[in-house]
Each structure stands twice: as structure tokens, then as C-alpha cells.
Amino acid sequence: MSPDDVASLSLAGPELTSIMRLSATDTVRARIALAVDLKLIAEGEKLPADGEIARALDVSEMTVRRALESMADDGIVERRRGRKGGTFATGRVSELPDAAVEAYHADAQEVHRLIDLRTLLECAVTHYAALKTTPEQLDRLAALVDDAASARDWTAYHRADEQFHRAIAAASGLDWAQEPYIETLERLYRYFIPYPMDRLRKANDDHAQMVAAMRDRDVAGAVDTMRHHVQTLHQTMFIGRPDGLSAG
């Protein structure tokens, strides 16, 4: 597949996915509600601060506040004031179908397409990064692995994870791949939902293996780890849906 083919493929998805019809507030509500519904956020678990959630989901803090307040009205989360306050998952889910959540489910086919496209691009940039990374770039990647490992919540992890993948793409030197890669990454991140920290730390183990392979100039090992790392999204995103579909 040529660079032009990849660029064309990255633009070949539906012009208007279901989630693009949602308001910013509804997208936040859907992403957190999905995580609660799938028990990725446990009953009684404290969510990150509103500002941290806003940075992870790339929305304003006011949007997060409105979404959480609507979820509190429906009993999905509880907002507590005071020194030990914050937002806590109640473990309950909406009794009626949530239109915003259903919009995410409706985009399953598009999400799978994005996962496969991301796999193609990640393997390409990882191949060349493994050949060309400088010691300074490797140290930067290792530092991002450490940042993700020390993350205390999914917001901090997501930030380090995104920086890690962008740094590999930059280290590859493949200028033609940068635009379709970033576009695909950003489209897929629109479907990001919170995951338990133990699962995210396992994903970060893949990052550590990639850095180790790159230091050894083990191109095949780095690419194989990256391929498995991204393809796993087919099984893990929106995991637990009754119809057996997974989306990434």
C-alpha cells in the first residue's frame, strides 16, 4: 500500500458518525456512563477532578461539570462536597436506554476500521523508529513509560499514553505518515472510555517492551509488540456488550 493509499483510506470513513451528532456534554456522559455500565469504573470509585477529566477527554471543564451533574441527577454518580468530596460512581446504570451511549454502540464498525488503520500506521512508524531512534529519543520514550506507570488515574495515564505514541511517530521520520497517523489517533481517541488502572498498567508493559526492543534495534520485536498492542483494542473496547460486539 502506497502513502497515497493510506492517506485516502484514513479519509474513507463515514462523513458523519453517530457520536458526531452528539453535543459535547452528551459525549462526556456517554464515555463515563459506558465505563460505569461495563463495570470499568467500580462502585464507590472516585473519579478524577473535573479539570483532569476535561483534559483527558479534550473538552472544557464546564462541559464535564454539566455531564456529571446530569449523571448525578440520574443516580449514576454522586457529587460530594467538602475535603473528602468529589465525584463517585454509585454502580447504578440508567434504567432507560441512554441515547448518547447507544450512539457510541452504533459506531462499532467505524471503530474497528480505525483500529485496523491505526495498526497499519503504528507498525510502519514503529519499524522506522526502531531503526532510527536516537539515545535521547529512547530516553524520552522511557520517561513516558515511567509517567504512565506512576499515573494514579486514567486521566494521567491517557495523557502519557498519547504522548508515547506520538513520540514514536515523530521518531520514525516518516513525514508522509504523520498527518494520517495523527488524524486516525484523534478519531479513535473520541471513543476513549476510562479503564481500570490494572488493565492500563498491563498495556504500559507493552510500551516498556517496545522501548527495550528499540534499544536493541530489534525491529521485528518492536513491530510485533506494537501490532498486538493495538489489535487488542478489538477485544477490549466496549468490552462486555451483550451482543458480543467490541469496539475500539
Image: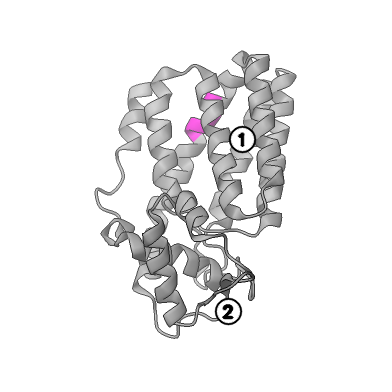
Quadrant where the image shows the N terminus: top left
Front residue of this view, candidates 248 and 148: 148
Main SS of residues in magenta: helix
Front residue of this view, candidates 189 and 57: 57
Residue at far bottom of view: 95
Please say whether residue 232 is visible from this viewpoint.
Answer: no
- Distance from the alpha carbon under mark 1 to that under mark 2: 36 Å
Residue, x 58% and y 56% (percent of image)? 236
- Mark 2, residue position: 90
Front residue of this view, candidates 93 and 6: 93
Q: Which residues are magenta?
A: 120-125
Q: Secondary structure at mark 2?
A: loop
Please say whether residue 69 is visible from this viewpoint.
Answer: yes
Q: Amino acid at mark 1?
A: Met
Residue, x 42% and y 81% (percent of image)? 73
Q: Are marks 1 and 2 in contact (CB under 8 Å)?
A: no
- When the figure is inspected, residue 2 is found, relative to residue 109, above or below; the finding is above
Q: Secondary structure at mark 1?
A: helix
Neighbor class of circle 1 (other Cα within 10 Å; few <14, some 14-19, many 20+) is many
> Would you identify the image quadrant in which residue 235 lies?
bottom right
Residue, x 58% and y 22% (percent of image)? 127
Percent of width and height locating residue 139: 68, 23
Residue, x 54% and y 35% (percent of image)? 163
- Mark 1, residue position: 226
- When the figure is inspected, residue 37 is found, relative to residue 159, above or below; the finding is below
